Structures are given as C-alpha cells and as structure tokens.
C-alpha cells in the first residue's frame, strides 16, 4: 500500500456494480427496440401482399379503432382525474392519520384487482345497473350528440367502458398524486397559513401549483394504462367498426387492443399482420403521449420534487 | 431460552432485536418425538393404502379394457368449437392407451389448417372444409404429393335464443330471423312474428339482436343458413365478421352472447345450443313444420346434404343443405371436420392417428362428445365411410 501519491484505485465492487447498472439500462433499451422491430416486421405483409386484408385500405380499417381508443381513454381520464385529485387532497391534507392510512390501503387494493374481473363486473353488474340512468339521460338530454340515439338494452356502451376504465386507472393516479402533494414544501404551506389563509386557500396557493406537473404526469400514466386496456373493454363493450360520438347506443367504436384480443384467435395470414399493424399504431400513439408528458413536465422542472 | 406456545413451534427471545421473539427450530422434546413418529407412521399407512386402493381401482378398470401396446406422442390443433370434445376424447383415449400422449391446441380453425399445412401438427380440427386453393399447396406433414383426408366428427346445433318475459318458445321462419338480425324488424309485436305465433302475447318492445363481436365459426354457419334461405333480406352472404350496417349488440364468445341475452329484455341472439341454458329458443320453419333444435334433428342434416363436388373419395366435405325442406331436420348446425394425412412420413405417427381417429368416430367417442359438448353423434353410414378412409391411411 504505497502512500507517496494518491492513487485512484477502482475497486472490483464498484466496477461490477456500475457495469450491472449499465447493463440493466441497456437491457431496457434492447427490449424496447426488440418490440418495435417485431411490430414492424410482422405488420409488413399486411401492406405488401396483393390480397388486401383490409378492403378499404389500412387507414380506413384502423381509424374507427383509433377513435374508439382515444374516446374511451378521454372519458376515463375526465372522470378519474378530479376524483384522484380529490382523494389525494383528502388523504394528504384533510383526513386524520388513521383514516388516511386505511383509505390509502383501500385505494391500493383497487389496483390489485385483475382487469378480467373488472370486465366481468362491468358486463354483469355495472351495465344493467346503469341502464336506467342511460334511459333517463337519453329522454332528458337526448338533444346533445353524446346522449342521442336508440339506447342499448343491455347498457354495454362506451359510457360504461369509460367508467370501468376510470375505476381501473384511479388507484395509480391517486397514489402518485398523493405522494406529490405530500412533497409540497412545508415552508410554502406554513407561509400561506401565516398570512391568514384558510386550509382551502393554502391548497390553492401552495399545494396545487407545486403539484401541477406531477398531476399531469400521473394523468399521462393513467392515460397510458387506459389506452392499452384489453380484456375489460373486450368483455364490456358492444363494439363495431363505426366512428360515432353517441355514448349510449349499441354501436360503439371498438378499441385497438380489444379488437386484437377478439379477432386474433380466428385470424390467419395477412389478417394477423393487419392486426399487428394496428398494434403498431397503438404503440406509436402511446409513445407520442409519453413524450408529450415528459416535455410538459420538463417545462416546469423547477417545481418537480428534485428541488 | 425458549418458550413453547404451541407444540413443534419453539420461540426464542432474541436480544438483538430488542427482545422480540423469533421463530427457531430446536430439537424436539421427547414427547414431540413420540408424536412425530406416530404421525409419520400414520401418514405412511394412509399414503400406502391410497396407492394400493387406487391401484385396485385402476386394475378393475383395466380388467375390462384390453392391454394397449400403443405409445408415442401426436399433436393437433384447430377449431375451438370442438375444444371441449377434444379434451374429453384425449382423456378417454389416454386412459385406454396409457403409453400415448395427445395434445390439441384450440387456436382456431384458420390457425389449425395453417399449422397442418406447415407440418407443425399431424392432425387438425376445422370448422370449414378445405378450400380448393388450400388443397393445391404442399402439405409438409404428409408424404410429398399426397393430400389430406377430412370427415365431420362434431355436429353442434346452433340455437337462436331470446329473452322475453313469459315466452319460452317462438315459431319463426328464415325470412323473419334474417329480418330481425339485419335490423329490418325492430319490434317484437311486428306482424311477421305475430302471424306465426297466434297463441303468444307479444309485448310492444324493441328487439335487440346480439351477435358475436369476435370472428367465429358459429357466426359463419348461422349466416350461411340465412344467406341460403333468405337471400333477398340477408345480402352479405356467409361472413365471420358481423357487418356494421346491420347494427345490433356485440358480445365476446358464446358465453358473452348468452350473458348479453340474459341480461337484457327483448334480446335475441344465436349461440351453441349446449350453452343455451333456460333461455327461450326459436323453432325454425323447415318445409311446412317448425323444428326446434335437438341432437337427432341436427344429425339428420348431414343425411340431407350432398358432398362437395370435384373432391376425392377420402374428402368428405359436405355442402350443408341449409334450405332443405325435409321434415324433422334442424338446418342451423356447426359441422366441424377432422383432417389428417393419407400417407404419413412416419409410420408410427400413422398408427397413432388411425387409432385416435377410429376412437373419435366410434359410438363411444361420439357419446363422449355428446355429453361433453351437447353435439349430435354422427350417423352409422357416415361412420362406415369415415372408417374406410381411416383404414386406408398409411
């Protein structure tokens, strides 16, 4: 052990650990690349073969499913976001300690329920339960394009799917937003209180502006889950390939993931490639939304939890 | 030291963890050893007697069956409609021939035919017979240049089910059924329905027609019936994907359709008859009379049908006579075929396939299928023809 000059000696443990970490990072990229390559490679026959699996062209085939995917996810997001913010606010700022623990635990339990169970519950319980409400909505507000049309007799509509998806993405969003609200700097809150603000004004002035970026990122995470949800939609929705805004009828636009789940078992040849091509479209959409979310968060990075 | 709160569970105070106890196993005391040895002896006796008794049961089974010398493994894939049947057939065949293992993957008719053509499986189940262009390909599982055989093994009636309070059966003809599912007849008390059911009180209720949202052979056979018997109303022919312009409610799988029909009021749908449960069913007009579904009525449709033209003698593809007017025939059936090679590359595989196929068409096999999937057993004449094809397999 020479002590003449400080020798920077890389220990074996450091080397191994840094390479392991590097390897893990590279593995993630490799897997992502492999999935993208698989999607591209398998969907190529659908475009190149003479015998067209989609009679009106690829875009005409996938457009209704894309529309349905986005519509169902937007409905789910619109329902789940205020609910998740409310739950997170209650748990972090209003509830007594014991109640907030129990509530947090129950919300996490919701996340543990498999999506097939949600699908069965939606189809067998929720849809018949909501049907009278749909009839009422159609009678009183039928002039709004969303509530028009002959109401479905079984209640398996886009509205029911939106509600089921909202319940499915609620736990993730509530848990994340709760964590973000708990990260609010105590100094900001105490300063607001010192200025005489009520509890709601403290939240409005200190908590919500701080958590805005976090709320957006949790919403994007929930949206990503809702976009890819397969079994719940396949079981609950009475879907077909139409583009329509009516939420209460029997003819609803199916989603990409549910369509693949329904048609894949009996498909063969170019039709399988067509289905995989629609999966590629879904992959692209999800990546685009995630990149958008990252960009939005980076704009407000000074308010992220890192500071 | 340790304190015993329960026999065999020894807890020890661990000062390192702030006095909390943790579970540790120490040598059992003498009475624990005594009881453990008694327990082990009892368990051994129970295990041995279970083995002996099951051996007795197996031996008594084997007394009635002859000793089988077949062994090997064969794989098939294809139609999911005969999935439950294949499971039952495999289970019984493997009991009778313990050295044989058979695998069947219900991945779908299209996937099964493709797998057979590519040589991945040695037999396949398919909801539709081989098309001419498919037969022109090379079959990798068979000797070069030979073509596959096929014959029906699974005849499953498709029931038209509905949910109307207080009504358990309705008489409808093909034109009415086509009109309902094409979205032209929209109310239950429409004249077309009421005129055929004079003694039924029909409510003023909208009809909701439920179809399959996934591609399926059930849809194909049902729409084949509609297109042959009511061409002017049902104009899209036999399709697997429901046309969007006809509307109606879509559900996933047979169970989805049955659930959707059960859950709504005034709903009507089509599903495999074995899953119809206690929903109301439709008696279809054939000729002059109305026929409700039953196993005999379904198997009669093969007798009334003719073979597809231009096929070899080992290709029993039937052009189902959906528009038959013979009495007592139920024309809405799903006919699934078994297909395999006439000449296999491996003689052992040929032996196994011959034995399995013979079992499937035998009376016992068809009875198993009837109890597993509610199908109609094939008739004796079809069995004769199929057995002749099987005997010719090399």
Image (cartoon, coloured by chain):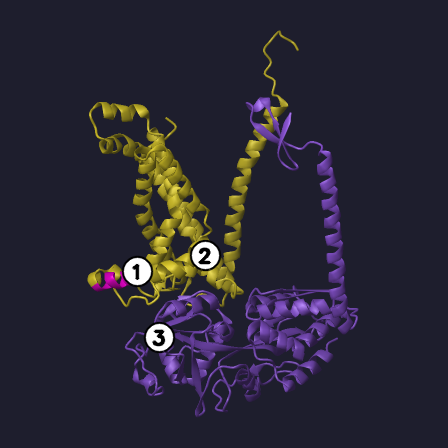
Q: Point out residue B54 in the picture as x, y percentages from the top left corner.
A: 73, 61
Label 1 CA crowd tier, 10 Å (few <14, some 14–19, many 20+):
many
Helix, strand or loop at disc 1? loop
Q: Are marks 1 and 2 in contact (CB under 8 Å)?
A: no
Residue A247 - label: 1
Query: Which residue lies at the image location 76% right of the left edge and 73% below the top edge?
Result: B64
In the figure, what tint was chain A given?
Answer: yellow
Q: Quadrant of residue B388?
A: bottom right
Label 2 CA crowd tier, 10 Å (few <14, some 14–19, many 20+):
many
Camera-side residue: A138 or A264? A138
Helix, strand or loop at disc 3? loop
Q: Point out residue B92 in the picture as x, y percentages from the top left corner.
A: 68, 69
Residue A231 - label: 2
Residue that carries the numbered disc 3 in the rendered image: B165
Indicate whether B34 appears above or below B269: above
Q: Which residues are magenta?
A: A132-139
Label 3 CA crowd tier, 10 Å (few <14, some 14–19, many 20+):
few
Which of the chains is purple? B
Q: Chain of mark 3?
A: B
Query: Which residue lies at the image location 79% right of the left edge and 69% below the top edge?
Result: B69
Q: CA distance from mark 3 to mark 1?
A: 28 Å
Q: Can you name the residue that lies furthest to the top here?
A: A4
Camera-side residue: A220 or B88? B88
């Amino acid at each position: 052990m020479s002590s003449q000059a400080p020798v920077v000696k890389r220990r074996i443990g450091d080397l191994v650990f840094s390479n392991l970490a590097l390897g893990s990072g590279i593995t993630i990229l490799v897997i992502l690349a492999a999935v993208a390559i698989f999607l591209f490679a398998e969907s190529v026959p659908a475009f190149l073969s003479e015998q067209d699996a989609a009679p009106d062209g690829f875009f005409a085939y996938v457009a209704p499913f894309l529309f349905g995917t986005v519509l169902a996810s937007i409905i789910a997001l619109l329902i789940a976001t205020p609910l998740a913010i409310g739950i997170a606010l209650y748990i972090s700022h209003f509830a007594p300690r014991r109640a907030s623990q129990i509530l947090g635990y129950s919300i996490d339990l919701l996340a543990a329920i498999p999506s097939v169970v949600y699908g069965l519950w939606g189809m067998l319980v929720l849809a018949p339960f909501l049907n009278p409400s749909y009839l009422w909505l159609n009678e009183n507000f039928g002039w709004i394009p969303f509530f028009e049309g002959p109401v479905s007799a079984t209640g398996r509509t886009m509205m029911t799917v939106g509600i089921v998806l909202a319940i499915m993405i609620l736990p993730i969003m509530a848990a994340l937003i709760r964590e973000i609200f708990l990260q609010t700097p105590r100094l900001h809150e105490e300063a607001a209180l010192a200025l005489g603000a009520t509890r709601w004004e403290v939240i409005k002035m200190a908590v919500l502006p701080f958590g805005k970026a976090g709320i957006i990122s949790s919403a994007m995470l929930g949206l990503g889950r809702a976009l890819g949800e397969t079994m719940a939609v396949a079981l609950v929705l009475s879907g077909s390939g139409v583009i329509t805004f009516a939420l209460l009828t029997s003819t609803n636009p199916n989603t990409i993931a549910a369509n693949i789940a329904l048609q894949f078992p009996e498909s063969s040849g170019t039709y399988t490639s067509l289905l995989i091509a629609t999966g590629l479209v879904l992959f692209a959409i999800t990546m685009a939304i995630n990149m958008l979310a990252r960009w939005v968060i980076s704009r407000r990075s000074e308010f992220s939890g890192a500071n | 030291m340790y304190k015993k709160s329960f026999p065999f569970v020894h807890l020890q105070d661990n000062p390192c963890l702030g006095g909390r106890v943790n579970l540790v196993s120490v040598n059992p005391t003498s009475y624990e050893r005594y009881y453990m040895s008694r327990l082990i002896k009892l368990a051994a006796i129970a295990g041995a007697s279970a083995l002996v008794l099951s051996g007795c049961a197996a031996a008594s089974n084997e007394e009635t069956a002859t000793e089988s010398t077949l062994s090997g493994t064969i794989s098939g894939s294809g139609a999911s409609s005969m999935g439950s049947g294949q499971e039952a057939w495999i289970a019984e065949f493997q009991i009778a021939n313990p050295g044989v293992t058979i695998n069947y993957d219900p991945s779908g008719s299209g996937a099964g035919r493709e797998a057979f053509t590519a040589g991945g499986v040695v037999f396949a189940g398919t909801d539709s017979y081989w098309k001419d262009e498919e037969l022109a390909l090379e079959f990798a599982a068979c000797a070069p240049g030979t073509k596959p055989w096929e014959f029906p093994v699974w005849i499953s009636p498709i029931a038209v089910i509905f949910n109307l309070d207080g009504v358990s059966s309705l008489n409808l003809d093909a034109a009415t059924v086509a009109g309902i599912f094409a979205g032209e007849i929209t109310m239950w008390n429409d004249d077309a329905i009421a005129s055929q059911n004079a003694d039924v009180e029909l409510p003023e209720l909208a009809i909701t027609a439920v179809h399959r949202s996934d591609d399926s052979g059930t849809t194909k056979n049902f729409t084949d019936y509609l297109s042959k018997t009511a061409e002017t109303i049902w104009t899209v022919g036999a399709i697997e994907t429901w046309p969007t312009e006809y509307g109606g409610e879509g559900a996933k799988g047979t169970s989805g359709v049955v659930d959707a029909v059960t859950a709504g009021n005034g709903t009507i749908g089509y599903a495999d008859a074995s899953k119809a449960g206690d929903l109301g069913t439709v008696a279809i007009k054939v000729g002059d009379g109305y026929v409700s579904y039953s196993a005999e009525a379904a198997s009669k449709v093969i007798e009334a049908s003719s073979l597809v033209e231009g096929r070899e003698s080992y290709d029993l593809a039937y052009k189902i006579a959906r528009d038959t007017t013979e009495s007592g025939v139920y024309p809405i059936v799903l006919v699934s075929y078994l297909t395999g090679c006439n000449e296999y590359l491996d003689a052992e595989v040929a032996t196994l396939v011959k034995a399995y196929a013979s079992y499937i068409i035998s009376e016992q096999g068809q009875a198993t299928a009837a109890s597993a999937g509610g199908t109609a057993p094939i008739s004796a004449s079809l069995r004769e023809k199929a057995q002749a094809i099987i005997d010719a397999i090399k």
